[in-house]
C-alpha cells in the first residue's frame, strides 16, 4: 500500500502525529471522568483542556462545547423535534431532519430568508463551495470548513455549529456540538448527566484527547499558510484537467471554495467507474460525500444545483491535503487522462 496516493481528505484526514501522541498519553489515565478521586479528576482535566483547545482553534471562547460521537450525533442533538429549512446540498446528517425548502443556484450558493429557522453549511463536502452565513442562523455544519479556512464561531452569528475530529486529522468517532452560552437543548441520550447534562454516557477520553491535539495543530497549519499551498496544488490539478479534457465541468469554480476540493465531471463517464479505475491505478478519490459515495446514484448536491442526472452521476471529487505533492498530481492526471482517452474512444 506504500505506493498508493491518498486524495480523499474530505472523507477523512490521516491521523496527525500530535493526535496519536495525545491519545496514547490519555490511555494511561485510568480514571472515570465522573469520579471525584484524583484519577477521575485527571480524566476530567483532559476533557476540560480539550474543550479549551477546541474553543481556541474555532474562535468559540464565548460558546459551550458538547462532545459527541461525531457531527451526525451533534446534528441530531439540536435538530430532533425541530422544523427547519435547508437546501438539498446539506449533508445527510442535517438534511434528514429538515424540510428541504431552500434553493441552491448553479454555483451551489444558497439564499436564506429565515435564518433563525434555517440551517446552512459553511462549506460543501462535495464541491467545496463556501457559503456566506446570515446573522442569526440556527445551525451551521462547519465540519469541512474547520481547519481549512479561517472561521470563528463567535463572529459567525450562528446559534449552533457542528464539528468532527477526523476531518482535521483527529480520530474517527468524536465530534462536537458548539452552541451559544445560555441555550438549552433537550438531551437525546439520557442517563448520568455528563457533558453539562446535555449528553449522557461516559466520555470518550482517548478520542477527545486526539480531537484537541488535532484541532490545535490544524489551527497552527492554517495560520502558517499550509492550506494556501494546497490551494495552489488544487488549481494546478484543474489546469491540467482542462488541458487534457476541455469538456470537463468543474463545479463551483466561479465562487469561493475550500482550498483543497475539486469536483468535476465528464458527462456520461460514470463517477463510480472513474473511482474504480483510479483506485486500480493507486489513487484514492471519491464520487461524493463519504456517507453516500458507496451508493450508486447521482449526486443530490449537483441535482440541487440544477445539473441533469447524467452529469450528476458522472462527478468525482478529488480532495487534497498538506501531504500531497505536485508529482502526485501529475501522476493522477496522467492516469485519469489515459482513462479519459479510452472513454472518448469508446464513445466515438
Image (cartoon, rainbow, N blue to C red):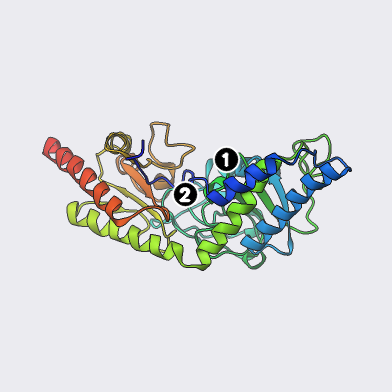
Residue drawn at point x = 17 percent, y = 42 percent: 338
Is residue 284 shown above or below 150?
above
Can the viewer see residue 230 in this picture? yes
Q: Quadrant of residue 107?
A: bottom left
Q: Give residue 62's mark.
A: none
Q: Classify the position of the N terminus by image quarter.
A: top left
Residue drawn at point x = 60 percent, y = 55 percent: 215
Please give left or right for residue 291 compared with residue 74 in the image: left
The residue indicated by pointer 2 is: 125
Q: CA distance from mark 1 to mark 2?
A: 17 Å
The residue carrying pointer 2 sits among few (fewer than 14), some (14 to 19) or many (20 or more) residues within 10 Å by Cα, namely: many
Residue closest to the far right = 36
Can the viewer see residue 81 in this picture? no
Please give left or right for residue 170 compared with residue 322 in the image: right
Helix, strand, or loop for circle 2? loop
Helix, strand, or loop for circle 1? loop
Most foreground residue, 80 or 146:
146
* Residue 222 screen position, x and y as percent: 51, 64
* Residue 164 screen position, x and y as percent: 59, 47
* Residue 304 screen position, x and y as percent: 43, 47
Q: Classify the position of the C terminus by image quarter.
A: top left
Please give left or right for residue 205 compared with residue 252 in the image: right
The residue indicated by pointer 1 is: 172
* Residue 18 screen position, x and y as percent: 57, 51
Most foreground residue, 81 or 209:
209
Q: Nearer the viewer, mark 1 or mark 2?
A: 1
The mark nearer the N terminus, 1 or 2, is: 2
Circles 1 and 2: CB distance less than 8 Å? Answer: no
The residue carrying pointer 1 sits among few (fewer than 14), some (14 to 19) or many (20 or more) residues within 10 Å by Cα, namely: some
Please give left or right for residue 320 compared with residue 329 in the image: right
Residue drawn at point x = 86 percent, y = 45 percent: 38
Amino acid at each position: 500500500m506504500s505506493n498508493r496516493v491518498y486524495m480523499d481528505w474530505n472523507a477523512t484526514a490521516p491521523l496527525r502525529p500530535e493526535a496519536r501522541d495525545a491519545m496514547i498519553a490519555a490511555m494511561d489515565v485510568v480514571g472515570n471522568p465522573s469520579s471525584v478521586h484524583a484519577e477521575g479528576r485527571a480524566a476530567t482535566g483532559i476533557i476540560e483542556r480539550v474543550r479549551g483547545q477546541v474553543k481556541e482553534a474555532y474562535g468559540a471562547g464565548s460558546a459551550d462545547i458538547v462532545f459527541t460521537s461525531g457531527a451526525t450525533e451533534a446534528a441530531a442533538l439540536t435538530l430532533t423535534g425541530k422544523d427547519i429549512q435547508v437546501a438539498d446540498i446539506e449533508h445527510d446528517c442535517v438534511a434528514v431532519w429538515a424540510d428541504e425548502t431552500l434553493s441552491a443556484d448553479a454555483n451551489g450558493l444558497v439564499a436564506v430568508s429565515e435564518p433563525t429557522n434555517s440551517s446552512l453549511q459553511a462549506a460543501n463536502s462535495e464541491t467545496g463551495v463556501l457559503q456566506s452565513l446570515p446573522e442569526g442562523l440556527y445551525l451551521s455544519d462547519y465540519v469541512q470548513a474547520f481547519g481549512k479556512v479561517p472561521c470563528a464561531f463567535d463572529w459567525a452569528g450562528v446559534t449552533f455549529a457542528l464539528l468532527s475530529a477526523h476531518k482535521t486529522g483527529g480520530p474517527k468517532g468524536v465530534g462536537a456540538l458548539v452552541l451559544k452560552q445560555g441555550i438549552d437543548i433537550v438531551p437525546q441520550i439520557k442517563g448520568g448527566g455528563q457533558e453539562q447534562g446535555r449528553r449522557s454516557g461516559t466520555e470518550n477520553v482517548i478520542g477527545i484527547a486526539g480531537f484537541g491535539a488535532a484541532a490545535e495543530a490544524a489551527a497552527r497549519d492554517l495560520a502558517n499558510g499550509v492550506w494556501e499551498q494546497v490551494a495552489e496544488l488544487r488549481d494546478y490539478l484543474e489546469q491540467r484537467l482542462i488541458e487534457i479534457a476541455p469538456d470537463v465541468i468543474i463545479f463551483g469554480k466561479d465562487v469561493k471554495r475550500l482550498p483543497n476540493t475539486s469536483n468535476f465531471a465528464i458527462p456520461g463517464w460514470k463517477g463510480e467507474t472513474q473511482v474504480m479505475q483510479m483506485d486500480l491505478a493507486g489513487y484514492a478519490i471519491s464520487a461524493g460525500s463519504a456517507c453516500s459515495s458507496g451508493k450508486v446514484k447521482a449526486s443530490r448536491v449537483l441535482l440541487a444545483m440544477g445539473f441533469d442526472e447524467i452529469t450528476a452521476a458522472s462527478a468525482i471529487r478529488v480532495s487534497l491535503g498538506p501531504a500531497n505533492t505536485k508529482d502526485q498530481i501529475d501522476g493522477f492526471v496522467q492516469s485519469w487522462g489515459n482513462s479519459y482517452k479510452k472513454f472518448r474512444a469508446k464513445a466515438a
